[in-house]
Image (spheres, rainbow, N blue to C red):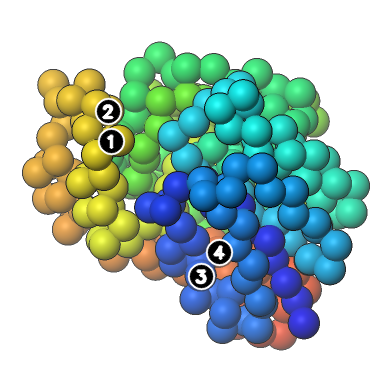
Amino acid sequence: MTKVLVCQHVPYEILGTLDPLFKDSGVRIQYVNFGRFPHLEPSLEGHDGLVILGGPMHVSETEQHPHLLYEIKMIEEAIRKDLPILGICLGAQLIAKTLGAKVQINQEREIGWHRLELKKEATEDAVLRHFKNKENVFQWHRDTFDIPKGAVHLASSAICENQAFRYGEKVYGFQFHLEVDEMMIERWLKVPYHQEALEAVKAKVSPEQIRQETQGNIEALKNLSQKTFSEFVRLFGFSKKFQRLDSR
């Protein structure tokens, strides 16, 4: 049975829309809850891919979060084994750091719905080829990463230049949150830890504005998520499981 190891850092950042795609394809999901067990050292043995979810910590906060160093070791191992890897937000930052790129605080927080612009290289990318040149996506981050040496820069936004990259053929880092649905967004707006961040951006966006914009954008994001994550699941070798969708 095909298995994917999923690294979770906080209870409110989950696989979201990627979860049913894995299950429908027959991929077994094994979660590692580093938020609850920060000293765990799970093995990649017997796994066919790695997904690293988001979290509020910075990649350098290894004393408070010792699992971060171990996750970097797992990323290195997964790359050596040529496994599909997806990093979302913190996960993308960890992949970038593993590949020698700098991770730092962005010029400003990017929270809510923002316009993503694809680079020319993304139009022929196997996973992102369903994106239009400009798409509204959901964001929630303060940090950003440099594009690793040897990686392909795939997307940017007005606030954060480095939004997505591919390393080799199977390693992807997304700064944005393609996996969210309405319930996840509403939960994030109510998380006590997030209130400081919402206060910091209140001059530009409010929780109520995010809720209103979610109503207008969420269905398109779900559709984009379905197409994009289906292509990521293909990297596990399920070429006959999905009907290939026409590229834009």
Residues at discs 2 and 4 in contact (Cβ within 8 Å): no
Picture quadrant of residue 237: bottom right
Q: Which comes before the other along the chain, label 1 or label 3?
A: 3
Q: Amino acid at mark 1?
A: His
Task: Tell me the element at label 3.
Answer: helix
For the point 84% across and 68% down, which residue is it?
46
For the point 25% across and 61% down, which residue is it?
182
Task: Tell me the element at label 4.
Answer: helix
For the point 36% across and 40% down, which residue is it?
139
Residue 45 is left or right of residue 117, and the answer is right
Q: Amino acid at mark 4?
A: Phe
Q: Nearer the viewer, mark 1 or mark 3?
A: 1
Which residue is label 3 attached to? 19
Residues at discs 2 and 1 in contact (Cβ within 8 Å): yes
Q: Is residue 240 above or below residue 132?
A: below
x, y percent for residue 151 = 74, 34
Number of marks in the image? 4
Which residue is label 2 attached to? 197
- Distance in Å between CA atoms under marks 4 and 3: 10 Å
- Distance in Å between CA atoms under marks 2 and 4: 28 Å
- Name the foreground residue: 34 vs 213: 34
- Distance in Å between CA atoms under marks 3 and 2: 27 Å
- Distance in Å between CA atoms under marks 2 and 1: 5 Å
Which residue is label 1 attached to? 194
